């Protein structure tokens, strides 16, 4: 088994050497791709120093050494990867020894498997604890059971290994999302590919969880979480998922809208965007939409209001 490991690098000078070292000790790793995302510290210098020592290391940068975000950075690494299998690692995290021992067995035993997800641990002020919540779920039921749509399992990018060909099926990471981009990607993969559990009893990777991150910006997280659900709904339509899965997505989005403190106009703009994306399904097949519309202003009143707007056009409406 030959694996390309992709590490997005952005101002990670304090952790980067440990991450690189933890990858290079894995016998299955034949390529380590370090993608610098416009670092302003000594991260790029560390990458270059390590590349001189180990020829398996490939260093990439965005044009003009720009900072383009983690999704664009991972996507660049994916596109340049030369091996048939791809794994990921954040620059402040690290693999444990024998990281891919169970992974390789899963791919060897079933050639139809597209990806293997495994448990990770998190290192915080309280020590190291098991982080991924993973139960053994049949691949065909993974979509419904993934958090936050379901409640049986959640996994981290640090614990995922996939065939490179999975991105031909599911597409790449969404570069418009600042957070929730990995959640969207897992749902897309679960919808069209075969993902199975590997080592779900013990961590294969340790993740550092600091106090400062993008996810500490609650408004940014909230906006991207809503956008993630909308993009997943669009994806469900694009790949012709069954209506039951579409309605699960809309139910989760509408539940979120009901919980947050947003004015009615902003919520209506998002609902309009959903309707425009797939009006036939929303009006005639979605139980989730009927429940939400009925609870908010009454279903018939909602239909009259939306029909009037659609007939007169949506010019001037500010979407997400």
Image: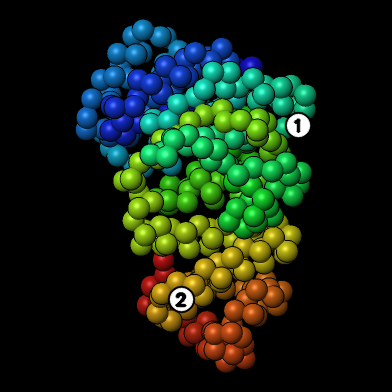
Q: What element carries label 1?
A: loop
* Residue sitting at x 35%, y 49%: 214
Q: Is residue 263 visible from the viewing direction of this image?
A: yes
Q: Please give the label number shown on residue 267.
A: 2
Q: Can residue 311 be seen in this view?
A: no
Q: Is 227 drawn above or below residue 71 in the view shown?
A: below
N-terminal label among 2 and 1: 1
Q: In this view, does 138 lie above or below 92?
A: below
Query: Where in the figure is residue 236, as x and y percent of width and height?
Result: 64, 57
Q: Verify CB contact (< 8 Å) between mark 2 and mark 1.
A: no
The structure residue drawn at horizontal position 69% and vertical position 60%, both measured from the top left corner, is 245
Q: Residues within 10 Å of mark 2 (few under 14, many from 20)?
A: some
Residue 142, x across and y down, in percent: 70, 48
Q: Distance between the residues labelled 2 and 1?
A: 42 Å
Percent position (x, y) of residue 237? Answer: 64, 60
Name the secondary structure under disc 2: helix
Q: Residue 225 carries which label?
A: none
Q: Name the residue under label 1.
A: 112
Which residue is more in the foreground, 79 or 156?
156
Q: Can you say which quadrant of the picture contains the N terminus?
A: top right
Q: In this view, does 62 lie to the left or right of 94?
A: left
**Residue visible at 54% across and 85% down?**
296
Quadrant location of residue 113?
Answer: top right
> For this rendering, which residue is in front, 138 or 166?
138
Q: In front here: 202 or 166?
A: 202
Return the x and y of residue 320 as percentages of the image width and height: 41, 66
Specify whether 76 is left or right of 130: left
Residue drawn at x 64%, y 80% is 291
Q: Is residue 243 left or right of residue 180?
A: right
In the picture, measured across the screen, residue 136 lies left or right of residue 69, that is right
């Amino acid at each position: 088994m030959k694996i390309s490991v992709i590490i997005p690098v952005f101002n990670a000078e304090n952790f980067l050497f440990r991450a690189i070292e933890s990858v290079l000790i894995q016998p299955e790793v034949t390529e380590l791709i370090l993608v610098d995302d416009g670092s302003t510290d000594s991260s790029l210098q560390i990458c270059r120093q390590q590349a001189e020592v180990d020829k398996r290391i490939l260093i990439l940068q965005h044009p003009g050494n720009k900072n383009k975000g983690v999704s664009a950075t991972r996507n660049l690494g994916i596109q340049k990867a030369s091996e048939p299998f791809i794994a990921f690692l954040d620059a402040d995290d690290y693999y444990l020894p024998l990281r891919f021992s169970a992974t390789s067995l899963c791919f060897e035993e079933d050639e139809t498997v597209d990806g293997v997800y495994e448990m990770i641990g998190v290192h915080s002020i309280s020590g190291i604890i098991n982080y991924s919540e993973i139960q053994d779920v049949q691949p065909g039921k993974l979509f419904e059971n993934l958090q936050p749509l379901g409640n049986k399992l959640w996994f981290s990018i640090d614990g995922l290994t996939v065939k490179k060909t999975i991105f031909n099926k599911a597409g790449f990471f969404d570069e418009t999302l600042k957070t929730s981009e990995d959640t969207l990607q897992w749902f897309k993969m679960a919808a069209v590919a075969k993902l199975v559990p590997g080592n779900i009893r013990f961590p294969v990777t340790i993740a550092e969880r600091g106090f400062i991150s993008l996810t500490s910006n609650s408004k940014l997280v909230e906006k991207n979480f809503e956008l993630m659900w909308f993009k997943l709904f669009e994806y469900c339509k694009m790949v012709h998922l069954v209506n039951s899965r579409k309605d699960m997505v809309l139910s989760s989005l509408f539940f979120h809208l009901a919980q947050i403190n947003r004015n009615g106009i902003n919520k209506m703009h998002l609902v309009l965007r959903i309707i425009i994306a797939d009006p036939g399904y929303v009006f005639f097949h979605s139980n989730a939409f009927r429940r939400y519309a009925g609870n908010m202003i009454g279903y018939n009143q909602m239909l009259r209001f939306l029909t009037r707007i659609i007939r007169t056009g949506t010019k001037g409406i500010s979407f997400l």
